[in-house]
């Protein structure tokens, strides 16, 4: 039985054409700023997001953390969505590396929040309170199942942040999923933010790499933070070539992943599973009562799906999962249901 891997869109492998682009990449020492392919990727990414400058970093986590470090001072508060990746999945980096605390606001099930939430989080400027130093938005929002925070909500948050002179960061690990789902271009999504991270190594299919975009002055700060975090890379053009290939070939096709997520969600509902809302991008969140058996039996059928927490599973569609794979996955789950595992 062929493996169907729905654990994450991070599992994609570079295609033959992407590998060919990597093999042919012109390279130099990027710590000297001399890698032409890295420079081309950074210029392409900055133009795509309508920002002055961009920086290649090894991971989304480093992009977020170098941005947080560049935008805050120790002792400050970062206001963000419930279950934000920077809080849940970055190993405590914001507190360890930047000395900030994270305060979550808004709706726990959709990962959304509003300008009113931001205003409510700002504290009086007296010595008891840690001052809010940054507002961070995650779009699409991972733990809610790839929900998209609509652009008007982003603008509302940005207006509140501006009223209080607070900088804004976007964890746009899956920003291009929001772009293809809404038809709103990346520059419009990026416009209110001082720093924007997006990942090349998730739905876009590159093996490694994320990008941070911002003003030239801000990217100089992020560059310094990247160096401190050990993220200076040498002949990184090999990776940048994969990133350029991803931006040229793999954005529009994300609509296929969204269609596959909807197909999977509908199939799971037909099989009697409770699905947490129709997918807005490439993730399906669903409930399973017999979690332990479900994990064991799906694994035994070469079907890989991660549990987010007890009873809740996340299936992610991506470049290496076809419509037929989704139907295969549903057939394997149908067998489990027939055996009473649900
Ligand atoms: N998310 C991974 C895991 O860490 C959970 C996944 O499988 O979804 N921001 C967001 C919104 C993310 O979802 C991720 C990765 C990151 C940042 C971090 O990216 P990497 O893994 O490149 O450090």
Image: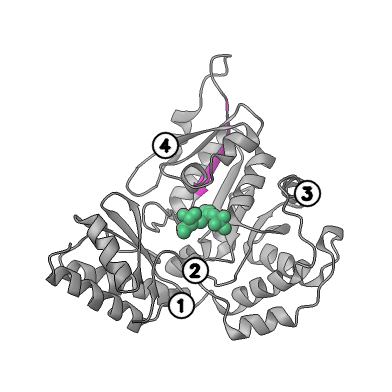
Badge 4 density bin: few <14, some 14–19, many ≥20, Cα 10 Å: many
Q: Earlier in the sequence, mark 4 or mark 2?
A: 2
Residue highlighted by disc 2: 11
Residue highlighted by disc 1: 320
Quadrant placement of the N terminus: bottom left
User: Which element is circle 3 on?
Assistant: helix
Badge 1 density bin: few <14, some 14–19, many ≥20, Cα 10 Å: some
Percent position of residue 65, x then y:
62, 45
Q: Nearer the viewer, mark 4 or mark 1?
A: 1
Residue plotted at (28% across, 63% down): 296
User: Which element is circle 1 on?
Assistant: loop
The reply, left or right, for residue 305 in relation to residue 174 is left
Q: Which mark is residue 220?
A: 3
The reply, left or right, for residue 235 in relation to residue 68 is right
* Mark 2 C-beta to ligand 1 under 8 Å: no
Q: Nearer the viewer, mark 4 or mark 2?
A: 2
User: Which element is circle 2 on?
Assistant: helix
Q: Earlier in the sequence, mark 4 or mark 1?
A: 4
* Cα separation between marks 4 and 2: 31 Å
* Cα separation between marks 4 and 3: 30 Å
> Relative to 340, is 96 above or below?
above
* Cα separation between marks 2 and 1: 8 Å
Residue plotted at (61% across, 53% down): 196
Q: Nearer the viewer, residue 101 or 153?
A: 101
Q: Nearer the viewer, mark 3 or mark 2?
A: 2
- Tags 3 and 2 touching, CB below 8 Å: no
């Amino acid at each position: 039985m062929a493996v169907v891997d729905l654990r994450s869109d991070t599992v994609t492998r570079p295609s033959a054409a992407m590998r060919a682009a990597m093999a042919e990449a012109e390279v130099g020492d990027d710590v000297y700023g001399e890698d032409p392919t890295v420079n081309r990727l950074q210029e392409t990414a900055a133009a795509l997001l309508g920002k002055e400058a961009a920086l290649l970093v090894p991971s989304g986590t480093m992009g977020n953390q170098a941005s947080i470090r560049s935008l805050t001072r120790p002792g400050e508060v970062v206001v963000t969505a419930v279950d934000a990746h920077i809080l849940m999945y970055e190993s405590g980096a914001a507190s360890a590396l930047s000395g900030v605390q994270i305060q979550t606001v808004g709706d726990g099930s959709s990962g959304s929040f509003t300008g009113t939430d931001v205003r409510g989080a700002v504290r009086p400027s007296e010595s008891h309170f840690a001052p809010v130093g940054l507002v961070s938005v995650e779009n699409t929002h991972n733990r809610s199942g790839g929900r998209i925070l609509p652009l008007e909500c982003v603008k509302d948050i940005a207006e509140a942040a501006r009223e209080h002179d607070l900088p804004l960061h976007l964890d746009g690990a899956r920003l291009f999923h929001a772009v293809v789902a809404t038809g709103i271009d990346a520059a419009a999504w990026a416009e209110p933010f001082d720093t924007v991270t997006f990942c090349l190594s998730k739905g876009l299919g590159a093996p490694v790499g994320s990008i941070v975009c911002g003003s030239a002055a801000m990217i100089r700060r992020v560059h310094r933070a990247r160096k401190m975090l050990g993220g200076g890379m040498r002949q990184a053009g090999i990776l940048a070539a994969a990133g350029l290939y991803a931006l040229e070939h793999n954005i529009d096709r994300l609509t296929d992943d969204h269609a596959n997520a909807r197909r999977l969600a509908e199939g799971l509902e037909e099989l009697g599973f409770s699905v947490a809302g129709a997918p807005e991008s490439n993730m399906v969140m669903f409930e399973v009562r017999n979690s332990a058996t479900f994990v064991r039996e799906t694994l035994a059928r070469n079907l890989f799906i991660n549990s987010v927490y007890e009873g809740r599973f996340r299936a992610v569609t991506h470049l290496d999962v076809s419509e037929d794979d989704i139907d295969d996955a549903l057939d394997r789950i149908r067998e489990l249901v027939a055996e009473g595992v649900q």
